[in-house]
Image (cartoon, grey):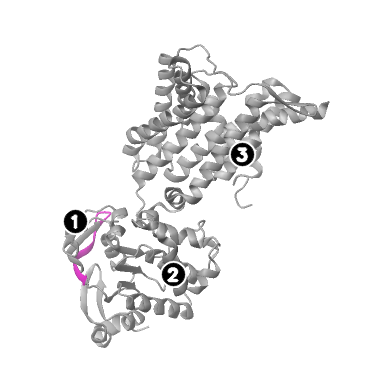
Amino acid sequence: MTLVLFVQHLANGLITGGLYALVAIGLSLIYGVLRIINFAHGEIFAVGAYVGFFLWRVLGVPLPLAFVGAMVGTAAMGVAAERLVFRPLRFADPLNSMISAIGLSFLLQNLILQVGGAEPRRLDPFMSGVLLVGPIALPLQYLFILGLAGVLIAAIEVYLRRAWNGLALRASSQDLGTAALMGVSIDRLARVTFAAASALAAAAGVLVGSVFLLQPTMGVSMAAKCFVVVILGGVGNLPGAIVGGLVLGVAESLAVAYVSTALRDVVAFVVLIVALLFRPQGLLRGA
Amino acid sequence: MLALDRVTAVYTGRAVLHEVSLRVAPGEIVAMIGANGSGKSTTLKVITGGLRPVGGQVLLDGEPLEALAPEAVVGRGIALVPEGRRVFPRLTVVENLRIGAYSRADRNRYREDAARVFELFPVLAQRARQEAGTLSGGEQQMLAIGRALMARPRWLLLDEPSLGLAPKVIDVVWDAIQKINADGLAVLLVEQKAFAALQLAARAYVLENGRIVAEGPSATLAADPRVKQAYLSF
């Protein structure tokens, strides 16, 4: 019986971990290519969730289409944010873009509050029903989320390996100046990066909304945890962000189950401190 | 014709090039020699859009080049092999070659060009799936040259290609430059190893403190007592 429960908690942890990974990949990508620490990435995740909610609840769009719509709409918003907030500061002291990102996060949070209201919202689950594996009950909704997160992560990996701009992104994260010599335009890359990162965050937002609740401040703790995930995995290291997300999700789930529910938001930072003490280069760096 | 017409450039408040004029005709190998800090790399930087001149013009077949962004220059047929090679260390050899073709309209046919690079440098074919950071200095130099060729340039600019290489490897690189040139590419070779550069190039320019102090056929320069004393004494 205890083993069954353990597996259940493990599965829960993997699901939250997959969602962390989706958001953290974008954060890592933006830093890796553009050296911007995007403090507004959590709010982009929240906007994505609310765009999905708006499409589904207010406009009556079917949930799967609302999911895609949220990704597309939020990608467009990410591109606009890059153009208006970050590009003018590209050659300025990095502190400037950091402060602007904080400003953007306040702006988006209050925008959500104005438009969406303060009360928590929720989306319908994408799937109902339970998959029974022996004595273990896995809600189909959870499996669906894990599968979809996996598909999206695989898609971004394939994009980075196969697509011309994916290759350009990886080259630029290693040497921006030399990438320009190859004909890579940093303006175009900045657009691609913000679009991809925002779309992934929006996907995570809608998925979160179908299990947990939507709140205007939902981006704050997500961002904090994803910074932990990115540092855990090694900054700018995408496989690291995936592993880091899963590790954090599982650690949180197990701590809540076996120690105390009050620990949920503490675990991330305990993990961070331990990681910085023993593997400051990140879990996968140099391995 | 690639030409600099009385180019003056300023870097961090200091004039680093004074009215530099030079030209590279299609199919030529031209060397630029001079001591460290004489302005050789800066000249290449001006040509590739990394530094905008405050005076003079950079012309490619009569069209001004100096207002172009760095990423647009390669599309005009000018590829740079940068100093220190600057291969992408965590991309594989094949990926480094592929990114070299990024600017081309027909870039999806990059494999044909990669095969040609492997013909030129067979050792790279053996390392095709390895990350470039694991290659030796000589192999990285070959990769940097191969990567530049992937853009199918008409002008190849090489910045200190022999830097830090063993004599044997330098021979390989020199042979390759000759082969590339025989295929019709013009080469502008920046070198501190002046004697070797003069053997390879038909013509050369001598730079000193940002000014061209001598120019002419390599044989004439190699025999010039002043040039000999200043640059060929080692």
Residue extent of the magenta highlight: B11-23
What amino acid does circle 1 point to?
A: Val
What amino acid does circle 2 point to?
A: Val
Is residue B153 found inside the magenta-colored segment of the image?
no
Side of A4 where A114 appears, left or right: left
- Residue tagged 1: B54
Chain identifier of the residue bearing label 3 in the image: A
- Residue A230 horizontal/vertical position (percent): 55, 39
Q: Earlier in the sequence, mark 1 or mark 2?
A: 1
Q: Is residue A101 visible?
A: yes
Pick whichever, A140 or A88, lies toward us: A140
Predominant secondary structure in magenta?
A: strand
Kind of element beneath mark 3: helix
Q: Which mark is residue B117?
A: 2
Name which quarter of the figure residue B220 lies in. Answer: bottom left
What amino acid does circle 3 point to?
A: Gly
Q: Quadrant of the C terminus of chain B?
A: bottom left
Q: Quadrant of the N terminus of chain B?
A: bottom left
